[in-house]
Amino acid sequence: MNPLALQDLRRVVAAVERLRGQDILDVTVRSDLRHLKVELGGGAMLVIAAERDEQGRPYLAVDVVEAHQDAGSRQQIEVRFD
């Protein structure tokens, strides 16, 4: 195993470690098997994709996308002035 592949695997492990204990809701694999998306109960999503760099060498792209909370969903205190 070359050092680049080992670094890729370490990134995958670090990303998956952040998601420990969360429920898996859905797993989607692209038809050409180059893209894996895991949707989790807490709103997070793990995306692992096989990509190529500028020289055409393959590598793994790993992302953890957290659920975005919009400003309207935050708890607010309502104060009335009568």
Image (tube, rainbow, N blue to C red):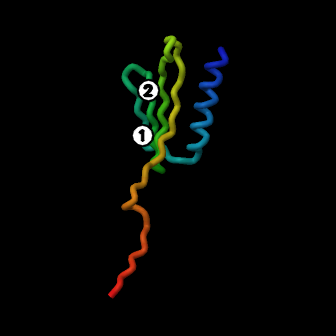
Q: Name the quadrant of the C terminus.
A: bottom left
Disc 1 marks which amino acid?
Asp
- Judged by depth in the image, the label closer to the viewer, 1 or 2, is 2
Q: Is residue 44 above or below residue 36?
A: below
| Tag 2 residue | 35
- The picture places residue 2, in percent across and down from the top left corner, at 65, 14
Q: Is residue 71 above or below residue 49?
A: below
| Tag 1 residue | 26
- The picture places residue 37, in percent across and down from the top left corner, at 44, 34
Left or right relative to 66: residue 70: left
| Residue beneath the point at 61% across and 40% down | 17
Q: Secondary structure at mark 1?
A: strand
- The picture places residue 43, in percent across and down from the top left corner, at 45, 48
| Residue beneath the point at 51% across and 39% down | 64
Q: How many marks?
A: 2
The image quadrant of residue 14 is top right
Q: Secondary structure at mark 2?
A: strand
Q: Name the quadrant of the N terminus.
A: top right
Q: Which residue in the rendered view is the most extreme toward the left?
A: 82
Q: Which residue in the rendered view is the most extreme toward the front?
A: 81
User: Of callouts 1 and 2, which one flags the residue occurring earlier in the amino acid sequence?
Assistant: 1
| Residue beneath the point at 44% across and 26% down | 35
Between the C-alphas of marks 1 and 2, the distance is 14 Å
Residue 53 versus residue 45: which sits nearer the camera? 53
In the rendered structure, are the residues bearing label 1 and label 2 in contact, judged by CB atoms less than 8 Å apart? no
Classify 10 Å Cα crowding around label 2: few (below 14), some (14-19), many (20 and above). some
Disc 2 marks which amino acid?
His
